[in-house]
Image (tube, rainbow, N blue to C red):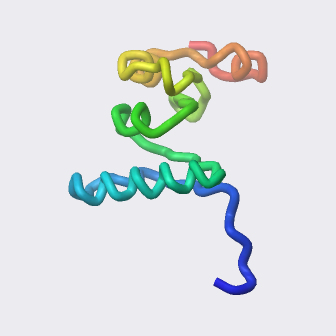
Amino acid sequence: MAGFARPRLLIIDEPTNGIDIGAKTEIHRLLRDLASEGMAILMISSEPPEVLASCHRILVMRRGRLVGEFDGRHATQVDIMSKALLGTPTEAAAAKGGETG
């Protein structure tokens, strides 16, 4: 596309919701390729296995508030779901007046 710069950030919301496994695999491959070329990708997903397989950094939100942050290499599905269902805001969010319970 002449005249357009390549974006540095791609925001995707539920990128594989409702598609077959072959298409999911292709989307994940494309996202890995873009990330390896230096593009930042912000993925919004309600599927913990997808997040764990794809993300370097995982932020968990509950009721519009940040309640958890994990290194994608060490996070587990239990970590993510515990914060999503029961979590309280991170210290940084709480210090800014976030929800405390």
Q: Please report the residue visible at 55 percent of the width from the left and 33 percent of the height from the top.
A: 56
Q: Is residue 48 left or right of residue 20?
A: right
Q: Please report the residue visible at 31 percent of the width from the left and 53 percent of the height from the top.
A: 24
Q: Please report the residue visible at 43 percent of the width from the left and 43 percent of the height from the top.
A: 45
Question: What x and y, as percent, mark residue 18?
Answer: 26, 56
Q: Nearer the viewer, residue 69 or 72?
A: 72
Say above or below: 11 vs 60. Answer: below
Assign the N terminus to one quadrant of the image. bottom right
Assign the C terminus to one quadrant of the image. top right
Q: Please report the residue visible at 28 percent of the width from the left and 59 percent of the height from the top.
A: 23
Q: Nearer the viewer, residue 84 or 47?
A: 47
Question: What x and y, as percent, mark residue 36?
Answer: 57, 49
Q: Is residue 91 left or right of residue 53?
A: right
Q: Quadrant of residue 76?
A: top left
Question: What x and y, as percent, mark residue 89?
Answer: 61, 19
Q: Is residue 32 left or right of residue 10?
A: left
Question: What x and y, as percent, mark residue 88?
Answer: 56, 15
Q: Is residue 68 left or right of residue 13?
A: right
Say above or below: 95 vs 44. Answer: above
Tally of marks: 0
